[in-house]
Image (tube, helix red, strand yellow):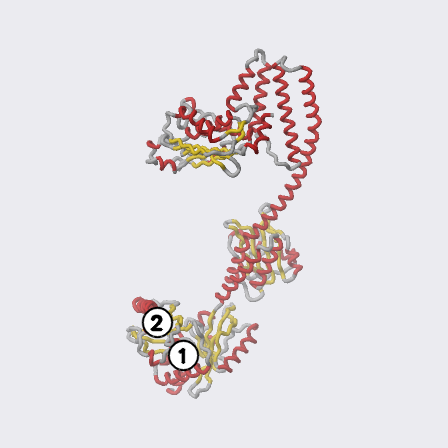
Amino acid sequence: MDSDDDVLRERFRVLLEDVADGFYETDLRGNFRFFNHALCRIFGYSATEIQGRNFSEFMDAENALYAFAIFNRLYESGEIPSEIIWTIIRKDGQERILEISVSLIVDRLGKKTGFQGVARDVTQKISDQQELEASQRRAYEMYQASSRAEKRYRAFLEFLPDPVFVFNMDSTVSYLNPAFEKVFGWTLKELEGKRIPFIPESEKVRTREGIKTLFSEKVLHGFHTRRYTKDGRILDIVVDGAIFYDAEDQPAGQVITLRDVTARKRAEQINQALFRIAQALYRFPGLDRMLEYITRQVQELIGVAGAMVILIDEQEQEFYIPVAAYEDGKTGSKMKEIRFPMDKGVAGQVYRTGEPLIVSDTAQSPYFYDQVDKQAQFHTKNMLDVPLRIQERMIGVLCAVNKKEGGFDRADIDLLSAVANLVALPIENARINEALQQAYENVRGFNRAKEQVIHHLSHELKTPLSVLSASLGLMAKRLGGGQDKALDRILLRARRNLQRLLDMQYEIGDMLREKDYRAHGMLSFLLEASRDMLVTLAEMEPGSTRAPQIIQQAIDREFGNAEIPCTDIALDQLVKRHLETLKPRFAHRHIRLEARLEPVVPVLIPTEVMEKIVEGLVKNAIENTPDQGRVTVVVRAAEKGPVFEVQDTGVGLTEQKQQLIFNHYFAAGDTMTYSSKAPYDFNAGGKGFDLLRITIFSERYRFDTKMISRRCRHIPTDGDLCPGAIERCAHCSLPTDCDASGGTIMQIRFLPSNQVNLACRMVEK
């Protein structure tokens, strides 16, 4: 009996020495009192040099402090740390990075007596067979010297985080550690004395080669293979093993360590695949070619017979399959363009829940929709669908069918979901691009039809307009000029409106010739037409001698006479001069008026019109700026021409009002407050003529207007009121506070006079 115990103890001693990891025991102070040879090899010191020394002597101060903290925490709380990394300094000065495990040693009385654990050198693997054999012999001698060795080494194997098993020479199991049971699912009771049934058919040839290597070289390191678990999953495994010996120095069995690298390899595969797909997607601007590439990649990555992209037709409330990739090309062609309702099938369930779905057996699934298989004449056995989503909107489903090896699992969901997240946006962009291309072709067709209509209209207008023009000329000659002023005015209006029709005909011609074309503004057209209509109506009534002149003078006074000739104006000088004229009108207001006027190239515009523009913008700014606020008048040069600008630190405009300014007859303030307030008073309001006529001037004299406004943050809505003076504001104590809270910039951007000469000549004409 004692002989059998000795053999068993010797077997466990040799087993411990055969593994590449170092085993150690220390007292509570961290002094080494027991360790295996692997630890000596890792540290680069002999057993004598390590025995009794403190762990801190083999590392720098930082690592020593870290190690002490780990041991101390374990001692105080009993918490077993995980993933401890130390850096030690070997005797030859080389550094080694170690992965350490540690646990408390407790005697039979429950007293804490020290620490034990495993140190794995992750920078170097043992590959020297002679050194392994020497360690086996030393382990054998150590086992003979200690009756406690068996328990000690068994505890060590029980503690190892990686699966370990011990084979007899006939490859039957004699020992499994708890980690093996946890990872692979079999217990020692189930497998003791038996072979482990976990080698896939595809790995049997390589496994035999690995066993040959183990028996010929007595050691095996870094052997990559795959193994089944009890529940049928396949794991990627790295194998390390060694032969151990009995008391007569004869081979007694094999000790094998397995490291599960499935998650790491899958992560590497996913990253490589996503990188490859991301690099390739930009090469496929067309939707079909992009989808063909995506489905082929899914086939290869997951190992399936078929893959497809199922997109949503929101208008028809249907799914459709634009592209499908199958090993049988005919099936892919049949699947293409199959449509089915959005509430049907596995895709319909994924659409309803927004979650991936595995169907392990389509015959047992309530969600499987067999009509698609019937149309394609294909048999789907199992499938995985994941959503194609852009933010919170689902555009379709990415589908894989008939996995070749095993069934779909969580890893497949993660991989297919990662691909779906990567390709969803490019797919949607490609769909939008195709829709835009189609819309563009439609617009081109409409444009061709429109050009034909316009060309016909232009041709039909030429003859009657020419006849009317000649007839008016003959009538004017026969009647003679100056004898009947009322008749002269009638002829003048007729010529003017005929000229409008001729201008329209010429502009149509410009459009057909694709010349730079800009139509007269609608406001200017309406103003001119309204004036002619009012004057005509007045002349039709008895006693209308002065009425037409009064109407025309009133309109010209407010909106300017379109026939006033343009002149070259030095903008900075005119603004400076007119500001001095305006200052007495708002002298009762406490406004900080600043002027930054720099010389610019002349602008071509009537002086009277430019003065109305200056007055309108300055008045608008002052009426919307509280006392102690600032109004700045600027003349400066810009890239395309001179700019006249009025800046204020007033209340600003809300977004709704900004959209209406310059687009409609609209005033910035209350439209009826002139009945109680004078011009230039704060919040005086008005009927909108200042801004309206600037819009008319811009259409007439070809300049641009721009407004930038920010509503005062203290009165964000139109219903909030400003007190009219900074000193009465509850939010601003200084003028600078008000300056930063809101304001408006109104810009008039002119072209140089030599570029607008033609425009003014057309107005004068």
Query: Residue 277: percent from the left, percent from the top?
Result: 56, 58
Q: Quadrant of residue 526?
A: top right
Which residue position holds label 1? 16
Name the outermost residue toward the top: 543
* Mark 1: few/some/many CA within 10 Å (<14, 14-19, 20+): many
Give 320 or 570, whichever is nearer the viewer.
570
Q: What amino acid is labelled 2 in the image?
A: Met
Which residue position holds label 2? 59
Q: What amino acid is labelled 1 in the image?
A: Leu
Give 483 or 286, whichever is nearer the viewer.
483
Q: Earlier in the sequence, mark 2 or mark 1?
A: 1
* 428 relative to 137 in the view: left or right: right
Q: Secondary structure at mark 1?
A: helix
Residue 721: mark in rendering:
none
Would you place residue 21 above or below residue 594 in this image? below
Would you place residue 313 above or below residue 757 in this image? below
Q: Secondary structure at mark 2?
A: loop
Query: Residue 264: percent from the left, percent from the top?
Result: 48, 66
Query: Residue 682: percent from the left, percent from the top?
Result: 39, 28
